Amino acid sequence: MIVLVGFMGSGKSTVGRMLAAKLDLGFADSDEVIERDQQMTIVEMFEEYGEEFFRKVEAATIVRLLSGPDQVLALGGGSLGSEQVRKALRPHHVVFLDVPFKRAKFRIREDPARPMLKRDDLEELYNQRIPVYRQVADLVVPASGRPGGVVKNVMGALARHPNVTK
Ligand code: S3P
């Protein structure tokens, strides 16, 4: 499975969808699967049950998806906080879409669908998460540019990667 990780606004969903089409694979976005399963939006989940509840559902959903059929999978930006998730990622191709904080922030601006944007320590959160994305990633791909170019770079990096069939 090819798994895309990175901060909010790194382009995981857009790039993931395009990449899946090119590779003729399915695509899933953990946030979308969670919303469908729970029959509520992530914002509603945060408001009604809190972040901790969301994180539990998120980890369980991702672990389930990772043991399912091969596809391109985009993970929510905070999901690597779970050790269970980090562990479950080991047998997969993990691609970190790397964008500077300012670029990510500009892309997401005031998206009302992202409850984490309400936090005033967003840059700190970014700085804490970057080393974790790097640590779990097999490939790090700069992702500040247009999605088409990023997809090309991911494909190139995957082709050069020795264990691409794992
Ligand atoms: C979150 C990122 C979101 C979503 C939720 C929490 C985070 O996913 O899972 O709002 O903690 O960074 P994206 O990275 O797809 O925006």
Image (cartoon, helix red, strand yellow):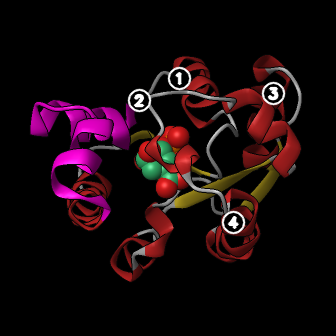
The rendered magenta stretch, by its main secondary structure, is classed as helix
Q: Which residues are magenta?
A: 28-51
Dot 4 crowding, Cα within 10 Å, few <14, some 14–19, many 20+ = some
Q: Is 81 placed left or right of 62 in the picture? A: right
Q: CA distance from mark 3 to mark 1?
A: 13 Å
Q: Which residue carries the number 1 mark?
A: 17
Q: Are marks 1 and 2 in contact (CB under 8 Å)?
A: yes
Task: Confirm or reject: label 1 Cβ below 8 Å from ligand 1.
Answer: no
Label 2 is placed on what type of residue?
Phe
Which residue corresponds to the image point at 50% horizontal and 60% vertical from the top-left?
A: 78
Label 1 is placed on what type of residue?
Arg
Q: CA distance from mark 4 to mark 2?
A: 19 Å
Q: Are marks 3 and 1 in contact (CB under 8 Å)?
A: no
**Would you place residue 94 above or below residue 117 in this image?**
below
Q: Earlier in the sequence, mark 2 or mark 3?
A: 2
Dot 2 crowding, Cα within 10 Å, few <14, some 14–19, many 20+ = many
